Amino acid sequence: MDCNIDPFTAVSQPKIPITLKSLPKDFAIIRHLHEPMTPMMQFRAMQITDLDAVVAIERQVQFHPWTKQQFLESLSSASHCSVLEQAGQVIGFCILQTVVDEANLLLMAIDPAQQGKGYGFMLLEQALAGLGERCVMVFLEVRVSNQAAIGLYEKLGFNQVGQRRGYYPSATGREDAAVMALTRDNIFG
């Protein structure tokens, strides 16, 4: 049987494509369909050698971007750091921090030249699936002005559960964040 190395546990696992049907039946994201990744697309664990590409994407999409050192610290911690590659080039990344049975989406971005093609959905869907059954809830904060991201998160089953006033720095001062959550039984839906 062909095997893959699980990028988050370094354990050899059978080579089974992750599809919506292979996710736990009670996870909220299973009700959405998408196109499968093409052979030129690869979802994998982030490596130190990816940091220059990841930082370049981050600088293009964030008003207050993370530094290379912050990404390096995430790689060294218990965070789930992943990338999406197309034809050998990193086009997106996702960082999820886990604590016991919950996770927090710390950061996610797709190269601006690749946005609007469904890659953000694929990346986050795969990253969430990589959390496994031990994770029962995922939280995130998103700028209230970022309607494209809010739409993506809602498509995956996230619901707004709160708001943080003045959470993000902006060109005009501070911006509020919507707090969103996804649960296995989608109790916020």
Image: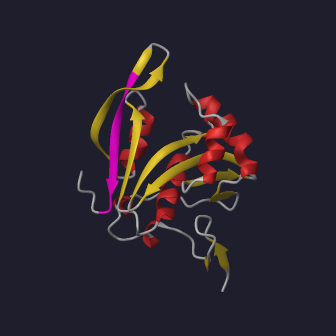
In the picture as drawn, the residue positioned furthest to the bottom comes out as 1
Which color scheme does this rendered protein use?
secondary structure
Q: Residue furthest top?
A: 172
Among the 4 quarters of the image, the one containing residue 134: bottom left
Which residues are the magenta region? 175-184
Coordinates of residue 185 in the picture (x, y in percent):
27, 62
- Counting every numbered tag in the picture gives 0
Q: Give the quarter of the image for residue 4.
A: bottom right
Task: Determine whether, in the image, residue 108 is placed left or right of residue 140.
Answer: right
- The answer to whether residue 47 is above or below residue 180 is below
Q: Is residue 182 magenta?
A: yes
From what the image shows, is residue 41 above or below residue 139? below
| Prevailing secondary structure of the magenta residues | strand
Whether residue 75 can be seen here? yes
Left or right, 102 with reference to 2: left
Vertical side of 171 occupied by 29: above or below: below
| The one of 23 and 95 positioned closer to us in this rendering | 95
Drawn side of residue 183 relative to residue 110, left or right: left
Q: Which residue corresponds to the image point at 40% horizontal and 63% vertical from the top-left?
A: 135
- Looking at the rendered image, the quarter that the N terminus falls into is bottom right
Q: Residue at x 70, y 57 (%)?
A: 40
* Residue at 63 percent of width and 53 percent of height: 76
67 lies above or below 49: above
Which of 22 and 141 lies nearest the eye of the viewer?
141
- Residue 112 location in percent, x, y? 61, 34
| Residue 92 shows up from this direction | no
- Residue 52, horizontal then vertical, whole percent: 74, 40
Q: Position of residue 63 (x, y in %)?
A: 55, 25
Camera-side residue of 69 and 157 = 69
Residue 9 drawn in magenta: no
